[in-house]
Image (cartoon, helix red, strand yellow):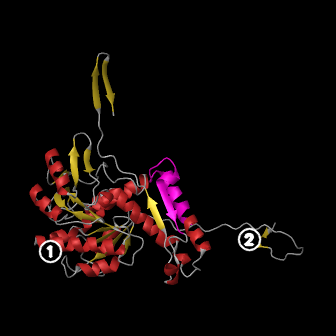
Amino acid sequence: MVLLKQGKMLTNYQMPGVYLQKVFSIPEPELITGVPAFLGLATAGSFNTPQLLTVWPQFEQHFGQSLSKSYLGYAVRGFFENGGRLCYVVRIEEATQSALPAGLDAIAPLDTIDLVCAPDIMLARQEADIRVMQNAILEHCELLGDRFAILDAWNRSIPEIQQQQQRLSNINGALYAPWLKVPSLEKATGTTLSEVPPCGHIAGIYARSDRAAGVYQSPANYVLEGGLDLSLTITNADFERLNSKSAKTGVNCLRSLTGRGIRVWGTRTLSSDPNWRYISVRRLFLTVCRWIERNLANVAFAPNDFKLWLGIERELTAYFESLFRQGALKGNTPQEAFFVKCDAETNPPEIRDSGKVVTEIGLAATIPCEFIIVRLIHGSTGVTVTT
């Protein structure tokens, strides 16, 4: 055994043999989820420069007091109120079609974020402008392939929200309604309540849910903190209209439930594809892609042979087994929950000659329980309740 003296390893070996060295490996950086980038208007700070925040008071330090016509401060405050711990804020020049792309370009290189929120685009006067900007955010998330958009519905009637819903379609985003009534940030005006988009509060719930259970847990049925009331009461009939089969995509609603507070009621994406219907399923796959990009980058330029294929299979299998143990994947055994295939069949000579290595993976993601059926069976011996 190699001895340590005053913190230094002795290396003057005198006799041939086997020597044991204790080496403590440095842990890999943790892959954190529930980290949003907020884009909006502010009174201070550099334009299109992401600023990391870990607590709410840092917002005014970097961006000044919230503008009278801005929802950015409310979104960031709502994020931290609901369990968020880490976010980036980007000050954009205007909440317009021409200014938004520069803000999106600023957050594109960030590999630490997995959520995008832009509450101030709801300030646009024209509905068409809002639609264009929301679709730009969705396209940004789709192009990057590692982030998910939290979008705000119009602060209007249910039929108008339906119209907005019908014009949005993407697997990398979700729509939330209605708006929230929250304590005003404008102390000088004496206004006590302000109506604001919910995206920041929702992002905080995503972060809270990820820490409590994991990214595969639906960020729904959580109490929303910081909201005193809703701008619109969504009835059961309204909820059914917004989430019917004919609607194809869903609207996740904030509902004030008797004795249970304001809760997030819904976990649907903006996709009509049944495979990507649920937020938790889509975010699980996005997180897997982030993990692969971070942990398999070291195999680039390695010899494309059996050893490489075996190493890729081993790394991915270990990761997916950890997801299976956490409950992210369904099945009684790992073999039922996932598969990894990287061999001569997925990498024929023409693929290898082009400098590529192809790995096929399959994951059986758990599906959220949306409907709880309770049966009351009346019989001669009494009533039996089954679920």
Is 94 a magenta residue? no
Q: Is residue 61 left or right of residue 318?
A: left
**Label 1: few (<14), some or many (≥20) within 10 Å?**
some
Mark 1 and mark 2 residues within 8 Å of each other at the beta carbon: no
The answer to whether one can see residue 40 in this image is no
Q: Which quadrant of the structure image shows residue 92?
A: bottom left
Residue at image coords 14%, 49%: 238
Q: Which residues are magenta?
A: 315-342
- Give the foreground label among 1 and 2: 1
- The secondary element bearing badge 1 is classed as helix
Residue flagged by tag 1: what amino acid is it? Answer: Asp
Residue at image coords 40%, 60%: 284
Residue flagged by tag 2: what amino acid is it? Answer: Gly
Q: Which quadrant of the structure image shows residue 78?
A: bottom left
The answer to whether one can see residue 140 in this image is yes
Label 1 sits on residue: 129
Where 101 falls versus 77 (above or below)? below
Q: Position of residue 272 (x, y in %)?
A: 25, 60
